[in-house]
Amino acid sequence: MNYVNTATSYLAIIFIGGGSSWAREETAFEAIKSVKVHCEDDWGRLFSFSETEPARINVYDATGVEGWYADDHGVFNGETNEKIPYLYTVTALLKNKRKR
């Protein structure tokens, strides 16, 4: 998808261990759905996800942002170094991948 400055864009991030999984979509719902799948694929063989403790999915308004980065102080616009607006956090259970 090509993100232009006028397109509405939502960034969903799951911070896990020393890394993260993320997804960027036109709707918050799609971003949340996508990041959940990415996290299960990215980290499911390294971590054992709890069947009762949900993961926290942070959602940001990335409209007009061409690039971004995250550190321990927040999520920032890669061009202006300004914080990207945080919207809310949702929780979801992650599925464990079978170990190979």
Image (cartoon, rainbow, N blue to C red):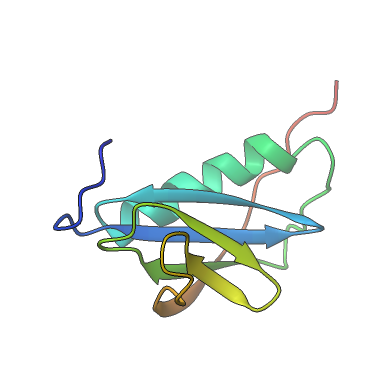
Residue at 34 percent across and 63 percent down: it is: 62
Any part of residue 66 in sight = yes
Residue at 25 percent across and 61 percent down: it is: 64
Q: Position of residue 51 (x, y in %)?
A: 73, 57
Residue at 26 percent across and 63 percent down: it is: 63
**Which residue is farthest front?**
80
Determine whether 99 is above or below 29 in the image: above
Quarter of the image that includes the C terminus: top right
Image-quadrant location for residue 79: bottom left
Q: Is residue 38 left or right of residue 19?
A: left
Q: Is residue 84 left or right of residue 35?
A: left
In depth, the one of 71 and 28 nearer the eye is 71
Q: How many marks?
A: 0
Q: Position of residue 40 (x, y in %)?
A: 64, 42
Q: Position of residue 6 (x, y in %)?
A: 14, 58
In depth, the one of 30 and 10 nearer the eye is 10
**Which residue is farthest top?**
100
Image-quadrant location for residue 60: bottom left
Determine whether 14 is above or below 21 in the image: below
**Which residue is farthest left?**
6
Residue at 25 percent across and 38 percent down: it is: 2
Image-quadrant location for residue 80: bottom left
Determine whether 84 is above or below 38 in the image: below
Any part of residue 55 in sight = no
In depth, the one of 19 and 31 nearer the eye is 19
Determine whether 75 is above or below 29 in the image: below
Quarter of the image that includes the N terminus: top left
Q: Is residue 73 left or right of residue 38?
A: right
Q: Position of residue 42 (x, y in %)?
A: 68, 37
